[in-house]
Image (cartoon, helix red, strand yellow):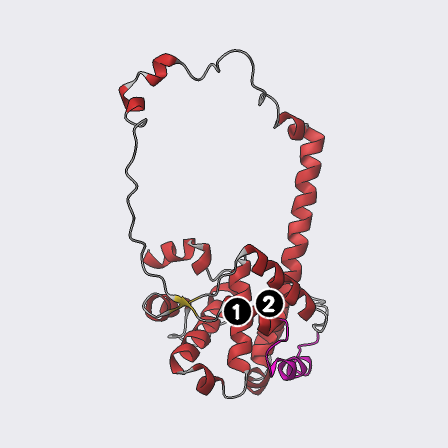
Amino acid sequence: MAIWYWQMDQLHSLTLSHQVTRFNVLLAHIAVSSPCAEQDLGSGLYHFLTNFVMAWLDAALGVKHGEDLTRDYFITRVWKKGMYDLVRWRPMQISRMKAAVKKLETVVPECTVSGEQFWEEVVNRPVEEHRKHGRVWAMQYIIYMERKAEGFKKDDQLRQADENLSSGDFAGAFAGLGVGDEAPDCLSEELFEREEVKALLVDVEDVMVQQPEENVPWMDPSAAIDVLEGNIDGVGDLMRTMESSFLIM
């Protein structure tokens, strides 16, 4: 039950539907795929990221990596009890992240099959190929999901606009918002004389609420943007490695 409540929070969800999670998966793949990753990141962060990637593959795609390295293990043992959390971005930063991912799409080949078929093909590849190309295939899949999500978003917006225009709800949604000369029927002086209403119409002392401590993001949001924009040394080499490791369908 605790895991279910944890997953209800979009910032702690391992599903495919949340863009921030997908961005973190993409960055985690880049981080752990770099040369000397464990030495550069430190054992604690490296452990967090590798388990995060495996838990996401397990939860979102059903790709198993062993009994211990599952979603439940990551959430209860690594995530909730550890010091690291996912990276979060402000609205302007998210816009830059989207633009950077869009640029990555230019080197990722078009997917000619469904996401399910893509991973069926991946699962059937030899273990040696998984060790050599597995992380790039997951990164490739993230890019596919970004394309798919963008398409769904546009289709949904167009469908909603068509429904509003055809049903008249677009204009009807604004009806009745004008203020007339008479008091609204829903409010009256008698209503404000009720004890339960009076109890709400009092000054409330401004009390500082102690906020619960949060885990620190595993990467600085600005640095994450720099990574995807190619402003970090070594990322160019990674892109060349990616191009030679794509799963061509």
Q: Mark 1 highlights which residue?
A: 25
Q: Position of residue 238 (x, y in %)?
A: 62, 82
Residue 171 can be seen in this image: yes
- Magenta span has 214? no
Q: Secondary structure at mark 1?
A: helix
Q: Mark 2 highlights which residue?
A: 142
Q: Position of residue 40 (x, y in %)?
A: 47, 85
- Magenta span has 242? yes
| Residue visible at 35% across and 16% down in the picture | 191
| Residue visible at 47% across and 14% down in the picture | 185
Q: Is there a contact, CB below 8 Å, between mark 2 and mark 1?
A: yes
Residue 160, disc: none
Say what amino acid the circle numbered 1 marks: Val
Q: Position of residue 183 (x, y in %)?
A: 48, 13
Say what amino acid the circle numbered 2 marks: Ile
| Image quadrant assignment for residue 200 | top left
